[in-house]
Image (tube, rainbow, N blue to C red):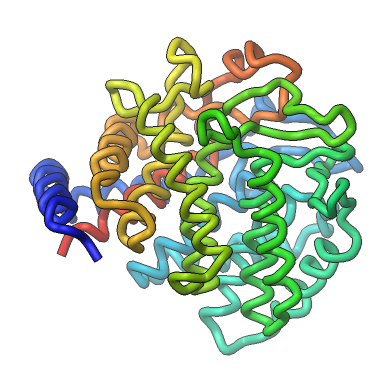
């Protein structure tokens, strides 16, 4: 329950945001983001990572299967669940139907990301024909995905095993789908494993000194590798914690919920302190001279606004979330593309390398902007 000062703060900041951005304007922006998302293509191969196993490894174009498209699908799925726009649902359905006509992808942490949207799609329908595929992927995560020490999900990707490494990306790409599939199929072991993975990743990736998150941890060297406090990696956490609590409907007083809420508030307090005057976050959070990154900003906006709505964070954080949403809106161009989005980013050997990642339109950037604006849209009657 909000106290008096929290309630007044919420009313004031929401009133100002509504005055600048009405519901029709936000809806128009979201439609433009969707239109741009489903048209993204890298026809000239400028951002082609490589060709592996005879497959064009394309994480930019919409009509391919990887984590970038998986996050894009999740943005559409959450938008549909609020708006019930049949056109948005159709984009999700068509993407999966087209992909199922292609050879099966190799299972990795990243290629499991689309399973989160597919589990949502399966839950919208009485048709259970997708259940066996969802179960197949979940069983792979439970039993065949390589593990680190202490049983963590090793961040296996298509071209690298990343032995003994935990990455913050894993919570969004594999752990959230596992939990959703567990609920859909009535398999509590999946849900319990997802809880354990959240706690283990907090243990090794949250920076005790700041509350922010490191990009990764290696048990082999027992360090955080580059030691990067990377903005988009942090945004996966800001998004995933409220989504996970909501998904599992964890009640107040539940030990996992209270632990995750405290972790989230420590992170968001630190994020608020390093937000730039233009509302963006720098791509390296403790380096204000690194470039502002819009996908991270959108993800943080979504997580903060949702956490406030769910009562997980005090209403005083609304200003931080809405400043970020304003920055996202300012970076959507006339074509509906979110600008200032960094390309896919591995764990580099040095922090300096993060600052050299190229900028381009990406499916996850579009989706994270959709999620941020969808959450802001809920502030309108």
The residue that appears at 19% across and 48% down in the rendered structure is 25
Of 180 and 311, which appears nearest the observer?
A: 311
Q: Residue furthest bottom?
A: 126
Left or right of 56 in this view: 228: left
Image quadrant in which you'd find residue 306: bottom left
Count numbered badges in the picture.
0
Q: Indicate whether 50 appears above or below 250.
A: above
Left or right of 233 in this view: 227: right
Image quadrant in which you'd find residue 58: top right
Residue 318 in the image, given as x and y percentages of width and height: 26, 46
Of 22 and 56, which appears nearest the observer?
A: 22
Residue 67 in the image, given as x and y percentages of width and height: 66, 47
Residue 11 in the image, given as x and y percentages of width and height: 11, 53
Q: Indicate whether 144 appears above or below 314.
A: below
Q: Indicate whether 241 appears above or below 349.
A: below
The residue that appears at 41% across and 52% down in the rendered structure is 371
Residue 145 in the image, given as x and y percentages of width and height: 87, 56
Name the image quarter holding the C terminus: bottom left
Of 331 and 324, which appears nearest the observer?
A: 324
Left or right of 108 in this view: 343: left
Image quadrant in which you'd find residue 127: bottom right
**Residue 173 appears in the figure:** yes
**Residue 91 appears in the figure:** no
The residue that appears at 46% across and 26% down in the rendered structure is 293
Of 316 and 96, which appears nearest the observer?
A: 316
Name the image quarter holding the N terminus: bottom left
The residue that appears at 81% across and 33% down in the rendered structure is 218
């Amino acid at each position: 329950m909000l106290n008096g000062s929290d309630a007044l703060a919420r009313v004031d900041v929401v009133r100002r945001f509504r005055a600048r951005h009405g519901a029709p304007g936000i809806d128009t922006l979201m439609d433009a983001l969707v239109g741009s998302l489903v048209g993204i293509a890298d026809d000239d191969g400028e951002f082609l990572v490589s060709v592996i196993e005879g497959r064009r490894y394309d994480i930019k174009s919409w009509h391919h299967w990887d984590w970038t498209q998986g996050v894009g699908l999740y943005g559409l799925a959450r938008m549909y669940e609020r708006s019930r726009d049949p056109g948005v649902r159709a984009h999700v359905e068509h993407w999966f139907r087209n992909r199922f006509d292609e050879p099966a992808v190799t299972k990795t942490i990243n290629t499991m990301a689309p399973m989160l949207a597919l589990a949502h799609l399966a839950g919208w329908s009485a048709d259970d024909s997708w259940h066996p595929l969802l179960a197949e992927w979940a069983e792979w995560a439970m039993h065949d995905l390589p593990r680190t020490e202490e049983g963590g999900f090793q961040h296996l990707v298509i071209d690298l095993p990343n032995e003994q490494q935990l990455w913050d990306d894993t919570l969004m790409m594999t752990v959230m789908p596992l939990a959703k599939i567990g609920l859909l199929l009535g398999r509590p072991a999946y849900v319990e494993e997802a809880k354990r993975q959240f706690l283990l990743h907090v243990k090794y990736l949250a920076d005790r000194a700041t509350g922010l998150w490191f990009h990764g941890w290696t048990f082999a060297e027992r360090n955080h590798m580059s030691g990067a406090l990377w903005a988009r990696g942090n945004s996966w956490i800001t998004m995933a914690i409220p989504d996970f609590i909501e998904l599992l409907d964890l009640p107040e007083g539940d030990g996992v919920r209270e632990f995750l809420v405290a972790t989230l508030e420590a992170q968001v307090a630190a994020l608020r302190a390093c937000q730039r005057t233009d509302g963006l976050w720098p791509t390296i959070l403790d380096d204000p001279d690194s470039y502002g990154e819009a996908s991270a900003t959108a993800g943080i906006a979504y997580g903060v606004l949702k956490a406030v709505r769910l009562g997980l964070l005090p209403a005083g954080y609304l200003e931080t979330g809405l400043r970020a949403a304003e920055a996202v809106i300012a970076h959507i161009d006339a074509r509906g593309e979110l600008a200032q989005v960094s390309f896919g980013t591995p764990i580099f050997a040095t922090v300096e390398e993060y600052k050299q990642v190229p900028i381009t339109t990406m499916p996850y950037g579009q989706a994270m902007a959709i999620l941020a604006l969808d959450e802001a849209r809920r502030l309108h009657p």
